[in-house]
Amino acid sequence: MVDVMISHLYIAIHYPLNNFTRFRVSMGVTEMSGFTGSCLCGSVEFTSMADPMLAAHCHCVDCRKSSGTGHCTHVVVPKEGFSVDGALNYFDKAADSGNMVRRFFCPTCGSPVYSTNSAMADVCFPRASSLDDLGVVSPSMVVYSSRAADWDYVSPDLPAFETVPEGGPQSVIAEHS
Ligand SMILES: [Zn+2]
Ligand SMILES: [Zn+2]
């Protein structure tokens, strides 16, 4: 244990500046990491104590309209350990599945911050656009590719689903948790 802590201290001393939010911190026997994000005006900040479980591009109409461009990129994190500092407003809209999606945004600058889905109570979905360190995520799939705008970029290197994978997003998240 002492050896583990010393090695972490060594790393902390020698690599203190690079990607600090991604840096693994030794806290007793539990290793923790995580990342942070914020809105455009800075009055809303969030912290996830956990690393992203998954990130995906969504081209559904609701994501497009709330994005300001062709799609949203959602990060999936455990709700436990996700905290927000600052006042948020939200808008509720049911997805195709009937599940209620609540999109939280900054009431001052309008930036989307994160969303929740009534069918997935244990996770939430910070927007990749709000990350302080963009490198913490690497999107691994595209959903609702059938609704992508002709002018929007859809990566040919990622698995793309016309709507959502069989079993819904829950099944994908379950696979990755
Ligand atoms: Zn703001
Ligand atoms: Zn969507």
Image (cartoon, rainbow, N blue to C red):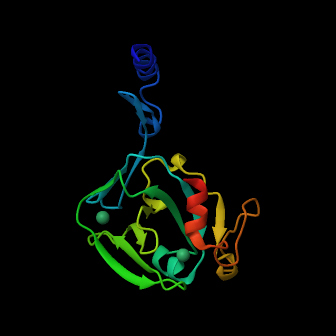
The correct choice, above or below, for 134 with respect to 44 in the image is above
For the point 49% across and 86% down, which residue is it? 98
Tell me: 70 left or right of 132.
Answer: right
Residue 63, horizontal then vertical, whole percent: 51, 77
Q: Where is ligand 1, by quadrant?
A: bottom left
Residue 120, horizontal then vertical, whole percent: 46, 68
Instruction: Pick whichever, 147 or 39, lies toward us.
Output: 147
The correct choice, above or below, for 45 with respect to 24 in the image is below
Tell me: 91 left or right of 158.
Answer: left
Instruction: Pick whichever, 117 or 112, lies toward us.
Output: 117
Tell me: 70 left or right of 159.
Answer: left
For the point 44% across and 54% down, which residue is it? 131
For the point 60% across and 73% down, which residue is it? 168
For the point 39% across and 74% down, which residue is it? 103
Q: On the rendered image, what quadrant is the N terminus found in? A: top left
- Furthest-left residue in this view: 87
Instruction: Pick whichever, 34 or 173, lies toward us.
Output: 173
Q: Quadrant of residue 173?
A: bottom right
Q: Quadrant of residue 20?
A: top left
Q: Quadrant of residue 84?
A: bottom left
**How many numbered discs, if any?**
0
Residue 18, horizontal then vertical, whole percent: 47, 32
- Furthest-right residue in this view: 156
Residue 145, horizontal then vertical, whole percent: 68, 75
